Each structure stands twice: as C-alpha cells, then as structure tokens.
Amino acid sequence: MKLNYFFLFIATCLFVSCSDDKEYENYNVATPITMSKAELRASIQVLPPQSIVTSGKIYAYQQYIFVNDVDKGVHIIDNRNPLQPTIINFLKIPLNRDVSIKGNYLYADSGEDLVVFDISQINNIHRVGFVEDVIQNYQYFQIPNDVDFYNWEDFDANTDIIVGWDIAVERREVMKDDIVNLESSSGGGGTGAGGSLARFKIVNDHLYVVDNSRINVFDIQNLDAPVKVGEEYVTWEAETIFHENNKLFIGSTTGMFIYDISQPSSPQYISEFDHMRFCDPVVVDGDYAYVTLRAGASCSMEGETQMLDSRLEIIDISDIYNPQLVETYIMDEPYGLGVKDDRLFICDGSAGLKVYNKSDISNLQLLQNYNTNDAYDVIPMVDKLLMIGNNTLTQYNYTATGIELISEFTIQ
C-alpha cells in the first residue's frame, strides 16, 4: 500500500510539472533602505574625529581642508603645518557629497536639503541654517548596477529618502522580453552614475548647486539664511560645475554646457559641446576648456557599449557660442583635474597623478607621473597642490620642473 502511495505522489508531481509551462530563474532584486526625512535631518551633528570610509572630494578654506566621506559627512583637517596635518572633528551629514564656504559659513548638501554651519570657531561648529527639499533627484544617483528588479513597494518619496540598498536573490518567473521591471509604485528609477569634482560653486552673493539635471541658484547675501531664487534645467545626468569670467561650465555625461550668469539669479544658456557618454569633469583656463572623459560601466547607461578609450579633450572656447574640439589625449582612468599657470594636473585613477606642461596644447609634455593610490580629486592652491585619493590627502610644492612631495596623510 505504501508503494502505491509513492507512485501516486510521483505521478501527481509529474502532472503538475507538465501542466505548468512557466520558467523560473534567480534574479537580483534591489529594495531601497530608507530613512524618514525627519530622522535624517535630526541625525546631523558635529562629532570628534572619526574613521573615514570612502574619501570623496576636497575643499580648502584658509588653513583648513575639508574632506568628504561619501554619503557620511565631512572630515575637517587643520593644515597650518602641511608636514603634519591633524584632524579636528567630523561633521556627520548623511548623504553628503559637496561643501562650499564663504565668510566662515559652510554650505553642504544632505540628500535633498541644503545645510548651513557656522565655522567661525573651528572647535565649536554649530548648524545655523536649513533649507529643505531644494536639491532634486539626489536619491536616485546611486541606483545599483547589475540588478534585474527594483522593489519600490514600500517607498514613499514624499516622506522617505534612500540611504542604501538591500540586494537579494529571488526566484521569479523568467522575463520573456528581457525588460527590467522597475515595479514602481511611487517613482521611477534607472541606472545612475556618481559625479566627480564639485557640484557647488559660490560666485559673489550666489551659490550654484548642480543636481542631477539642473542648476539651483541660492541667494546667500545673508550667509546664515540662504534662499533659493531660481533653477535652470541643463540636461539629465549633469555632474560638475566650474566658474570662469561670469560663465558657468557644466560637465555632464553627454557634454559640456555653458551658461552666462551676468544676471546671477537667472543663468542663461550660451552653447554646448557634445561628446559620447562618459563621466565628465571640466576646468577652464583662458581660451581653452579641459575635459576628462572617463569610460566604463559606471559612466554608461545599461546596455550601452563603450567604443572609445578614456581621454582628455581640449576645447577651444575663444568663440563661446561655438566651442570646438582641438586636441585629444588618451588617458587611463581620469577623474579630477586642475590648472595653474602652464601646468595641467590630472588625477588618472590607478595610473596616479600626472603633471603636464600645457604651454603648447598641441603637444602636451608629461613632466611627472606620481604613482599614488587612486588619484581622485585635485586643487591647485596658490602655494601648493592638494590631492585626495584612497582616503589619503597628499600635498605638493610647486617646482620649476613640476611638483615635489610635502606630505601624505591617511585619514584613519
């Protein structure tokens, strides 16, 4: 009798299997980890020195250096003795990427908010201002790659903000048409890319903040009480901002966009220079714009194929209404860059910091290549060069033939 039941069980399983023609596979499913906006705002605070997780951009002000810890906050370094920098404290600012300072007031992004700190007493910093929900699209910058489904079921964009992702493998019915299912009940999604270099720029009494698609303009005549006075759409996936001669140069994954700010609260489009999809910071010196274009999966849309190598492009902007590409140089993995006099500095990722003589743009001369760890961002100061990469702040003196090392300081 037990044997008969066994065969009946097998037959039933076969019948069910044959009648179900659905196919199943394992898929990566990403669910946003959220925090309420109220909780995020309440978590901002000034702390004693903390260990760094992932170094981002740097900002120099007077004798201090501010190092972004990606999405965590800002480490403040006393650099009065460049041979021996010391960490003073840490501004815990969730979802922070950028800072800018004027008159001892520090402006920082925190997700969709703009936060203001009084740093006039560096050992007694306190928050003095807060402007809510003024930086758009921030929380979608870092949607993870290599995900088949996004689960937005419990996410409410009106009250919540994304602070991370939980990625799990789930067995689901095969997607017959190979289209990624966003499962969105409260907003869209897609593959995004993080930017390199600054999205903040202060020009006189205005702060310009580039989010994922537009220039946000803040009046900061009252330094402790910024007021948003305008915004101008640029393009999807805007990344960086640079100021020169009353112009803003916006780097994006698809080109460089130029705006006039003769009317500070209302940037006016002038022209653009298009390129293939790359990550794109830009700096300007005289009649030329220098643009590093970094190829790779993080700088392309899902399904796109990168056909070209990473490169430096030099664009003639003497006719500001008609920018023209004049030179191209192949690079390895370029991120931040800077210029000072006849020197061009390029953070070329794992290939290190490269120093060029740019007096003849048609024949750049490589003067030095420091094989430093993952060179990321650089600031040419009046008296020295600052560079960040792999949680290490490196400082150099200028020399007649390039630069020489002052110190290396790893933020522990």
Image (cartoon, rainbow, N blue to C red):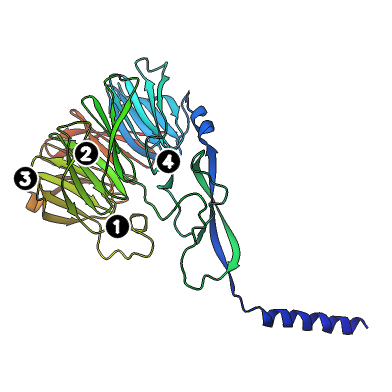
| Cα–Cα span, label 4 and label 2 | 24 Å
* Residue in the picture at 66% in, 78% down: 20
The circle drawn on residue 54 is 4
Label 1 or label 2, whichever comes before in sequence order:
2
- Residue identified by numbered label 1: 295
Do the residues bearing badges 4 and 2 touch, measured as CB atoms within 8 Å? no
| Kind of residue sitting beneath label 3 | Ser
Q: Secondary structure at mark 2?
A: strand
Q: Nearer the viewer, residue 283 or 337?
A: 283
Q: Position of residue 404 (x, y in %)?
A: 21, 36
Is 70 left or right of 33, judged from the image as shown?
left
Residue farthest to the right, as pictured: 1
Q: Secondary structure at mark 1?
A: loop
Q: Nearer the viewer, mark 3 or mark 4?
A: 3
* Residue in the picture at 37% in, 51% down: 193
Is 160 left or right of 206, judged from the image as shown?
right
The quadrant of the rendering that contains the C terminus is: top left
Q: Nearer the viewer, residue 377 or 82?
A: 377
The circle drawn on residue 318 is 3
Do the residues bearing badges 1 and 3 touch, measured as CB atoms within 8 Å? no
- Residue identified by numbered label 2: 242
| Kind of residue sitting beneath label 4 | Thr
Q: Nearer the viewer, mark 4 or mark 1?
A: 1
Q: Position of residue 295 (x, y in %)?
A: 29, 57
Do the residues bearing badges 3 and 4 touch, measured as CB atoms within 8 Å? no
| Cα–Cα span, label 3 and label 4 | 39 Å
The circle drawn on residue 261 is none
Mark 2 surroundings within 10 Å by alpha-carbon count, few (fewer than 14), some (14 through 19), many (20 or more):
many
Q: Secondary structure at mark 3?
A: loop
Q: Is residue 22 above or below residue 366?
A: below
* Residue in the picture at 38% in, 41% down: 136
